[in-house]
Image (spheres, rainbow, N blue to C red):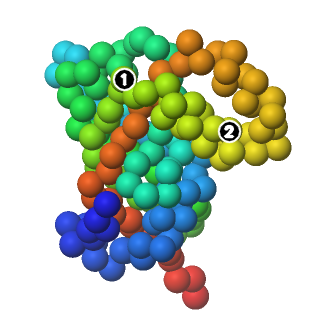
Amino acid sequence: MNYINETVRRQDRLMDEERALELLATSEYGVLSMVDEYGGGYGVPVNFVWDGHDSAYIHCAPEGRKLRALALHPKVSLCIVGRVNLLPGHFTTEYESVLLFGTAHTGLSDEEKMHALHLLIDKLSADYKDLGDQYAHKSFHRVEIIRIDFTKFSGKRKKVKMG
């Protein structure tokens, strides 16, 4: 996965790669954007977990609009928003965000799906790993896992100097 910030219009607002990866590792959710089955734009908030390399996993129901869209158009983006601070008296907002681009894959092996569920449990329910494992096994047949293999990403932030 290549960190490419050359295409960011506001070069004065670039986020360093280390912070972008930190957001990828710790953020609770992102917005997955894709082309729907009718050719329209479709963005949906999702929980995700980064594998620490070039991919992220998302869990969902075994059928639905998202899966129909990805079957036809697997190229996606994932937008993660970090800290946001509205500054009404300055008519601006401080923010940080990461935008990732890649290809979505479904039809993963049972082993990879269970691995992804355990990664999600470790991230989102770390205090309940044993219970999470039981739940993952019990509901396995009702879950689909999407793996997004990222090719590039960029990060942007705005910090206002007060004074």
**Location of residue 14 in the rendering, given as x and y in whole percent from the top left corner:** 36, 74
Residue 90 shows up from this direction: yes
Choose between 65 and 125: the one closer to the eye. Answer: 125
Quarter of image, res 85: bottom right
Whether residue 40 appears in this view of the structure is: no
Residue 64 is situated, as x and y percent measured from the top left of the image, at 40, 12
Q: Residue furthest left?
A: 39
Relative depth, front residue between 90 and 31: 31
What's under tag 2, amino acid-wise?
Ile
- Nearest the camera: 65 or 145? 145
Element on which disc 2 rests: helix
Task: Name the image quarter holding residue 158.
Answer: bottom left
* Image mark for residue 121: 2
Is residue 131 found left or right of 142 in the rendered image? right
Looking at the picture, does residue 117 appear above or below residue 26?
above
Q: Amino acid at mark 1?
A: Gly
Relative height, residue 139 to residue 14 (above, below): above
Residue at the spot 57% in from the left edge and 83% down from the top edge: 162
Residue 107's tag is 1
What is the number of the mark on residue 155?
none
What x and y, as percent, mark residue 135?
72, 22
